[in-house]
Image (cartoon, rainbow, N blue to C red):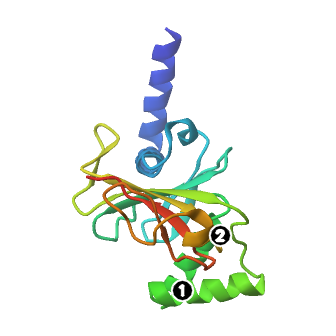
């Protein structure tokens, strides 16, 4: 009886404000997309960001743990949802700002490196992780709330580390093998790209 009454109130609220219900459904889809890249035990507490209709970035859900996740950008080809340790998020957000201002990806990396060096952009102190669900053929299924035909890759930022300090090669030994990219720079990171 109580559940039926709650359902009736929800239906009434949707009839009164269809746009609010549509926005709520859109936000839930964005949350599903974003946290599809997160470890299971971190999904519920992750902050989630998505996109307004005009392409601007927005916070959809406040977080309660160390992870921030972004939904797929509907204006870009393919699918990519990513989750970052909160220490990485300012760097990612700044890159978005710089690219919106006309810089290409490499230019924004150089600019952010200079800002980190100058102390105006916070960066990872020790290690921090990033999880990416992606795929050219990947797609989000609204009916099931799942991302189909996607792959995962994993990044662990280790600023300043080298092949010598980590014992890792600077190219992968094979599918799924960890390797160190951008060694001896602020962006040094361990890459893991599972097969498939």
Identify residue for label 1: 108
Q: Residue at x 30, y 37 (%)?
A: 144
* Residue 125 image point, x, y percent: 73, 66
Please state if 127 lies on the left or on the right of 33 as rendered. right
Residue 110 visible, this angle: yes
**Helix, strand or loop under label 1:** helix
* Residue 87 image point, x, y percent: 68, 62
Marks 2 and 1, how far apart at CA: 13 Å
Q: Quadrant of residue 55?
A: bottom left
Q: Nearer the viewer, residue 68 or 191?
A: 191
Q: Earlier in the sequence, mark 2 or mark 1?
A: 2
Q: Is residue 149 above or below residue 78?
A: above
Q: Is residue 33 above or below residue 52?
A: above
Is disc 2 surrounded by few (<14), some (14 to 19) or many (20+) residues within 10 Å?
Answer: some
Which mark, residue 90? 2
Residue 71 visible, this angle: no
């Amino acid at each position: 009886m109580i559940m039926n009454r709650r359902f009736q109130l929800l239906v009434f609220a949707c009839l009164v404000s269809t746009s609010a219900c549509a926005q709520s459904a859109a936000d839930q889809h964005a949350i599903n997309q974003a946290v599809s890249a997160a470890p299971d035990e971190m999904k519920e507490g992750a902050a989630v960001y998505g996109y307004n209709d005009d392409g601007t970035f927005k916070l959809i859900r406040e977080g309660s743990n160390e992870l921030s996740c972004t939904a797929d950008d509907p204006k870009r080809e393919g699918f990519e949802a990513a989750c970052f340790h909160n220490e990485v998020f300012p760097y990612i957000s700044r890159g978005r700002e710089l690219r919106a201002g006309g810089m290409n990806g490499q230019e924004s990396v150089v600019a952010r490196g200079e800002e980190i060096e100058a102390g105006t952009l916070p960066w990872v102190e020790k290690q921090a992780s990033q999880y990416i669900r992606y795929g050219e053929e990947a797609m989000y299924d609204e009916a099931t709330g799942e991302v189909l035909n996607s792959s995962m890759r994993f990044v662990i930022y280790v600023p300043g580390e080298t092949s010598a300090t980590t014992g890792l090669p600077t190219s992968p030994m094979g599918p799924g093998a960890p390797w160190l990219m951008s060694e001896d720079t602020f962006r040094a990171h361990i890459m893991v790209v599972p097969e498939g």
